[in-house]
Image (cartoon, grey):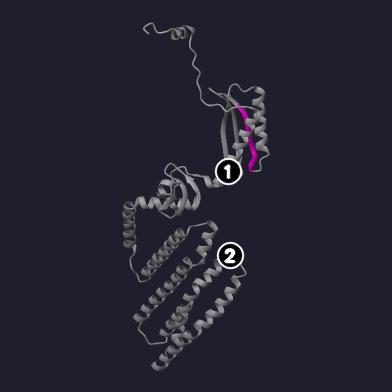
Amino acid sequence: MVESFAQQWGIMINHESIWVQVGFAALIVIFALLIKNIVTSIIFGFILRLTYKTKTDFDRSLVIAFEGPVRSLIVVIGVYIALHCLPLSLTVMSLASNLFRSVIIIYITLGFYNLAGGDILKELSEKINLEQSVLSFTAKMIRFIIIALSITIIAQEWDYDISGFVAGLGLGGLAFALAAKDTASNIFGGIAIILDKPFTVGDWISSPSVEGTVEDMSLRTTKVRTFANALVTVPNSVLVNEAVTNWARMKKRRISFHLGVTYTTPRVKLQACVNRIKELLENHSEVHQDLIMVRFDQFNDSSLDIFIYFFTKTKVWPEFLAVKEEINFKIMEILEGEGVSVAFPSRSVYFENKLKSELDQPDSGQ
């Protein structure tokens, strides 16, 4: 449309003198310089006010990204129209036409380049909880693709055969992928971790490779602070192929153990201990009431075992230990109140009478 208008304008003033044509061309360029800020301020200001009434921020980011390129493009259009007012040869005008289309592609590329690094990616990262390093890497990759496409389109505009260039890029990419396959696997592992979100920074995790608190995550590695205060750097390709337990996402903490009492404990006292321990847990404010089990479980080798199984409401490790300690002391109090002793591993040895009599006889040599 711009080229058609410029050609019609050139035909209208073609019969004028060279100085008149140069004057018209200069006036067009000056007019474009004068109105670029006015037009963009009015048009983009109006569109920007409309975007604040929408629910999404994409349209606002799009307007902001393309405001600068469009302002410069007005001047380029003015210069292009002015060139049609001058008595230039067809070769020069063909060159100017290719250059004009290339500049339009460059400004469109600049708009999308600004959009890729704008607030839209930050808002998207907040919604899906992306790390800053991933956001930066994604923005760079998108910008690289935009620039590569722009160069390809401009090369085609100037009648360059890009098939060899594309084939070369394919072979180069294959060679690079083979050389950096470990790095690539770590990067894809990092992307999988970010998308699946099995853990985040600050979570306590355990795997066959490492156990500790996640301190930092990047596209290539994950850094875990162990409970010995050592920092372990684990490749993401390792973590993504292992079973990872995220202890930080527990809804409650489990306590499970067997309490062994001596075989001399009467049945009545054993039953009383079971009932009182269960009552203790059911009335404790820090014990989760969804599942509480206190049962006389088994006849062990040297004890009568009471199985105790319950959960605490708190997930915090120090608080969990405090609740566990308090309950243990109260269980000891119940056992003391019932006169029941905790069993310990023991073994009784019985001798036959013949062996005992021989040991009792005095040594004949003394």
Provide the secondary structure element on which disc 2 rests.
Answer: loop
Give coordinates of residue 220: x percent, y percent.
40, 53
**Residue position for label 1:** 322
Residue at 67% over, 28% down: 272
Q: What is the three-letter code of the residue carrying label 2?
A: Thr
The part of the image, by quadrant, that contains residue 253 is top right
Most extreme residue toward the front is 366
Quadrant the C terminus occupies: top left
Residue 298 lies, with reference to residue 45, above or below; the image says above
Q: Which residues are magenta?
A: 286-296
Q: Can you tell which mark lies on residue 148?
A: none
Give coordinates of residue 123: x percent, y percent.
53, 63
Provide the major secondary structure of the magenta segment.
strand
Q: Is residue 290 magenta?
A: yes
Which of the pair 281/174 is nearer the observer? Answer: 281
Give coordinates of residue 219: x percent, y percent.
42, 55
Residue 2 relative to residue 43: left or right: left
Residue at 40% over, 8% down: 363
Is label 1 in contact with label 2 (beta carbons under 8 Å)? no
* Residue 65 visible here: yes
Compute the Cα span from label 1 to label 2: 49 Å
Q: What is the three-letter code of the residue carrying label 1?
A: Ala
Which of the pair 261/333 is nearer the observer? Answer: 333
Q: Residues within 10 Å of mark 1 (few under 14, many from 20)?
A: few
The part of the image, by quadrant, that contains residue 296 is top right
Give coordinates of residue 313: x percent, y percent.
61, 44
Q: Is residue 118 magenta?
A: no
Q: Is label 1 or label 2 in front?
A: 1
Q: Can you tell which mark lies on residue 56?
A: 2
Provide the secondary structure element on which disc 1 rests.
Answer: helix
Residue 329 lies, with reference to residue 183, above or below; the image says above
Residue 13 lies, with reference to residue 258, above or below; the image says below
